[in-house]
Structures are given as structure tokens and as C-alpha cells.
Image (spheres, grey):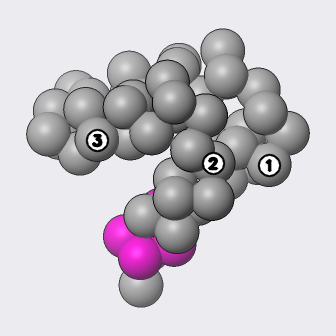
Amino acid sequence: MRNGSLDGDKSHMDVLIQTIGKPDAQSAGTVQQLADKYEYDALIHLLEEAVL
């Protein structure tokens, strides 16, 4: 998803968000809101925090 954010590929991110939503709807909702608003810096930061 980070690559999708950096490339601005919203359709790719939407597919990945749907995948996240299956096990974790709340996190997927947060990620979707950031993607819909094109807040890519915040999205990348959130994803980096989730990995750590």
C-alpha cells in the first residue's frame, strides 16, 4: 500500500483496503478515509506505525 500511496494509485489502494477490511474493518475504514482525502503522508505514517 505504501507504493500505491507514493505513486498516487488510488484504485490499487482501494483494492488493498478491501483486503485489509476483511479481518479488520475499523482499520480499513481509517485507511480508506485517508486515501479518499488523498492524505498520503498521514496514510504512510499510519502504515509505518502499524508495521513497527
Q: Is residue 40 left or right of residue 17?
A: right
Q: Residue at x 49, y 24 (%)?
A: 36
First-in-chain label (3 vs 1): 1
Report which residue position mark 2 lands on. Answer: 40
Residue 6, label in figure: 1
Q: Is residue 8 above or below residue 50?
A: above
Residue ID for mark 3: 30
The amino acid pointed to by label 3 is Thr
* Crowding near the residue tagged with mark 2, few <14, some 14–19, many ≥20 C-alpha atoms within 10 Å: some
Q: Residues within 10 Å of mark 3 (few under 14, many from 20)?
A: some
Kindly indicate the quadrant of the structure image that contains residue 19: top left
Tags 3 and 1 in contact by the CB under 8 Å rule? no
Residue 10: x percent and y percent?
67, 22
Between discs 2 and 3, the one toward the N terminus: 3
Residue 21: x and y in percent read 26, 29
Q: Which amino acid does label 1 sit on?
A: Leu
Residue 26 on the magenta segment: no
- Residue 2 placed where, x, y %? 67, 53
Picture layout, residue 37 above or below residue 48: above
